[in-house]
Image (cartoon, rainbow, N blue to C red):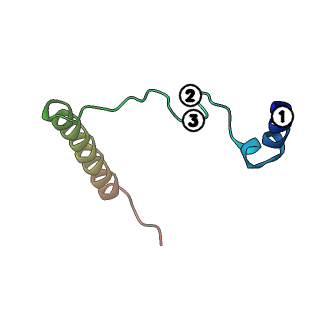
Amino acid sequence: ESEMGKKQADTGPLSRRPDNSAFKQQRLPAWSPSLTAQTVLPTFYILSLVCLLLGIWLLITVKNTYELK
């Protein structure tokens, strides 16, 4: 009877179940960043400075280009 039940499980809806591993069941440990003022503000200021410098560089480049007619 147990062998018969095993055969039914292999052909029934339970046969399509994924393996019971942490990867396939999505139980892996995850890294979550801690968003505090000490981590967010320096990142924000550095990105702001990069964007500002890129904008200044683009303005200078556009001013020094000549249009061909």
Q: Quadrant of residue 30?
A: top left
Mark 3 Cα-neighbour bin, 10 Å: few <14, some 14–19, many ≥20:
few
Q: Quadrant of the N terminus?
A: top right
In the picture, measured across the screen, residue 19 lies left or right of residue 60, that is right
Assign a secondary structure to mark 2. loop
- Which-is-in-front pick, marks 1 and 2? 1
The three-letter amino acid code for the residue at tag 2 is: Ala
Residue 32 versus residue 48: which sits nearer the camera? 32
User: For the view shown, which residue lies furthest in the front direction?
Assistant: 1
Residue 18 versus residue 34: which sits nearer the camera? 18
Residue under label 1: 1
Q: Position of residue 6 (x, y in %)?
A: 81, 35
Mark 2 Cα-neighbour bin, 10 Å: few <14, some 14–19, many ≥20:
few
The answer to the question of whether label 2 and label 3 lie on touching residues, with beta carbons closer than 8 A, is: yes
In the picture, measured across the screen, residue 67 lies left or right of residue 43, that is right
**Residue at 39%, 61% in the rendered image:** 66
**Residue at 85%, 31% in the rendered image:** 3
Q: Quadrant of residue 25?
A: top right
Please tell me whether residue 65 is drawn above or below residue 3 in the rendered image.
Answer: below
Residue under label 2: 22
Residue 4 versus residue 34: which sits nearer the camera? 4
